[in-house]
Image: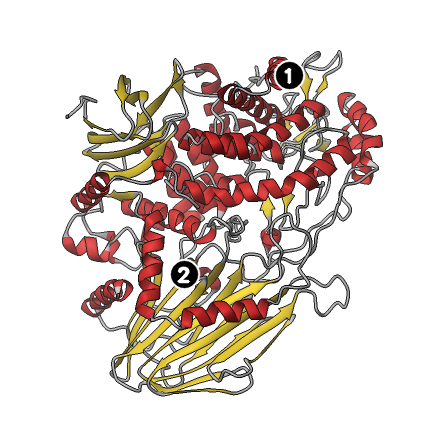
Amino acid sequence: MKLAYSMAAILVGAVLALGDHAGIAQSAVVPACDRPSPEDTAKAFEWADRAAVTSDARRQGDQRMLWYRAPARVWEEALPVGNGRLGAMVFGGVADECLQLNEDTLWAGSPKDASNPDALAALPEVRRLLFAGQNAEATELAGKTMMGRPTRIQSYQSLGELNIEAPGAAGASAYVRALDLDTAIASVNYVAGGVTFTREMFTSAPAGVIVARFTASTPGALDLKLAFKRAKDARSEAVPGNAKAIRMTGQVNADRGTDLGMRFAAVLLAVNDGGTVSNDGGRLSVSRANAVTFIVAASTNYPGLGRGGPSASTDPATRAADAATRASARSYDSLEAEHVTDYQRFFRRVVFRLGLPPDIAGALPTNERLARFKSGRPDPGLAALYFNFGRYLLISSSRPGAMPANLQGLWAWKQANPWNADFHTNINLQMNYWPAEPAALSELHLPLFDLMDSLVAPGSMTAKTQYNARGWVVHHLTDAWGFSACADGVQGIWPMGAAWLARHPWEHYLFTGDRAFLRDRAWPLMKGAAQFVLDFLVEAPAGTPVAGRLVTNPSHSPENAFFLADGKTQSRFTYAATMDLEIIEDLLKNTVEASSVLGIEPEFRAECARARARLAPVRVSPATGRIMEWVEDYKEVEPNHRHTSHLYALHPASQIDPIMSPALADAARKTLEARGDGGTGWSLAWKINMWARLLDGNHAGLLLTNLLADKTLPNLFDTHPPFQIDGNFGATAAIAEMLLQSHARQDDVWILHLLPARPDAWPDGSVAGLRGRGGFEVSEQWLGGKLTEARVRASASGPVFVKLGAKMVRFELKAGQTLVLDGSLQSKK
């Protein structure tokens, strides 16, 4: 099976046609709603073909292909492959290939109860000071008494590198490096010395290994040298008894002598066709081979989420060797075929294509195409490529049974990574999973729920120790070891992480209709988060703007600061920040509904309803007409701050809606206008979602243009800067929001809003397989800016509203039925 090679060969032909570039430098069970019908899948590909300009554009400008004419010079140009647990960044060097490796459990640190017992005694005084407007005094006291012990976490780490030398191949022509998003196979092709060399690399989820295949058009032309490398805490060596194997073993913080961390290992086995393989103390040499397949496996002694510290009984080297040995006993073709089948059951659920510009921008390599776009040349197909890449990244970094995608997904290149590549819970972790449900990757949401389950026990200890509260709490970050206390400074005293996370299992239920999941997994998580906020809320005293209402105290609006009434003194610490109240309103509403759906715990349901009725409301500034971010109408220190926390109610929640609550939606629009159209990569992604919710497709498209032009790296990774993967995932979700929205209901019936925020820059296109709440699968085609056909498939029997512009029609559907509509929402059969 040579799927990747066939596409790479097409690209090599394109490069040869464009000119010879010589002298390249060295260098779980699937829910029913997630199974698309064969009819709908066929229609998806028919629409995709129809949207392409020419057959050449379809080959060279495929919106499922990244490709380049040169190797990666830096990490941000390398191409990612992954299976949720193992990842690699492919540089594609000619004489010196590098695969930078990751294993998703390789974290520094260990489990610690960082809860601070001094916090509870100090809490009443901190609250009194904040209610009295003595923010500086409250900040000082809280900094001394409420921070976690320790106040920092340690980083997710790179596993290391596999360096592959190809002596004598310093120059090359017809070079193409590519990543086929349809097969999840990276490839490198070039000609050197009259020989065509080809590499294919993928990370197999079924086999649990990284596979790299090197071939040459001339027999005996492959000469390679391979070795593992890591900056610290590891050694490389031969595998005893196997001349075709090398390994790297180590232990995190081995140089300290104390605070020893996880043990880890990587093993490589070579399977050669012709030639010889020799081993010199951890350096593998392949000589005069026709082809060779390298199998890389890796493991740690991480015990699993919530299962304590590193296991003393687990030998990572043995586990890695076993996995590599099993895979090496199979043919390359069988490993590839199994990998492609497994991957495509996720990726091919959604097919999205936008019309290419007349000059077929897609015929350009991805980096040149991106540079062309940055110069102001239109390229709607680039948005489709970015969306498809975002789905690819989630499939590759979040699989059931693996760790959830962290701040860099799976691919981190250092031992101490930016922001520790942690799980940031004041938006970034949640944003990683925004596309999971609408982009038909529902079961890839499960690792997040596994993390949440693991946080209940430590989060319950922190809730009790620091706040004398029921339930569980997480502050603004966590790690692989269940850290739940306040971290990084007073800005970390933001106990809303669990409450925000609890939205995700509820969303999973809304999209899948899985009542067993709601009962067994979602409800305990939601109830525990709700118990905490019920106990954390306090009544605002007389003399405050929301006297008599329930508020949070202490509070932050992550991670923004404001000027106090004197216009000079800055603070972040406050009470009743708008975001807190919106998160709690959302959580309590969802918890009440979940209790009603399940028919359980009416007393707790009533407790939630009573508290919800007493919450301080979202307020609009009389001076600016904007949503107020804090309890007072403070002036912001940074008017264009990257966080837009006080619009949580617009997105990801839906309390603010242009149809259901137009006055608040108008205030939200003014807020976004004031925030500006710039920001970090993930900040732009969030705002694109918000503009889509306001049904302003052109403004959403403008910010997507800004993200692609200013915050996208050559390999299409998002940059804060530096690289953070949440912007990729947030923008992927935003594109889905521009094409389909399903958050609103009328008379308790879901509304599927077709093309709600399609920008004028996307006049022609098609998308098949998007998901809507209520268990619907939706496909749409449009030409000249007008819907030509839509298909709605129901997973359960019942009513649905379908909306297009101002028109809305109600239909009754049966489970498994596909409703086919024309551009006027008339049924075609």
Position of residue 39 measured from the top left corner of the image (x, y, whole percent): 20, 39
Q: Quadrant of the C terminus?
A: top left
In percent of the image, x 24 and y 62: which residue is there?
Answer: 7
Q: In the image, what residue occupies the spot 45% across and 61% down? A: 208
Residue at position x 26%, y 44% in the image: 353
Q: Quadrant of residue 292?
A: bottom left
**What secondary structure is found at the residue carrying circle 1?**
helix
| Dot 1 alpha-carbon crowd within 10 angstroms: few under 14, some 14 to 19, many 20 or more | some
Q: Would you name the residue on which mark 2 appears?
A: 204
| Mark 1 vs mark 2, CA separation in Å | 48 Å
- Expressed as whole percent of the image width and height from the top left, the position of residue 660 reads 42, 15
Q: Amino acid at mark 2?
A: Ser
Q: Is tag 1's residue or tag 2's residue first in the polypeptide sequence? A: 2
Count of numbered labels shown in the rendering: 2
407 over 164 or under it: above or below: above
Colouring style: secondary structure
**Location of residue 538 in the rendering, given as x and y in whole percent from the top left corner:** 72, 20
Q: Residue at x 36, y 28 (%)?
A: 741
Q: Split into 4 quadrants, where in the image is the N terminus?
A: bottom left
Of residues 403 and 32, which is closer to you in this image? 32
Lateral position of residue 722 relative to residue 62, left or right: right
The residue indicated by pointer 1 is 607
User: Could you tell me the amino acid type at mark 1?
Assistant: Glu
Contact (CB < 8 A) between labels 1 and 2?
A: no
Where is residue 51 shown, x and y percent of the image?
Answer: 19, 43
Residue 804 falls left or right of residue 138: left
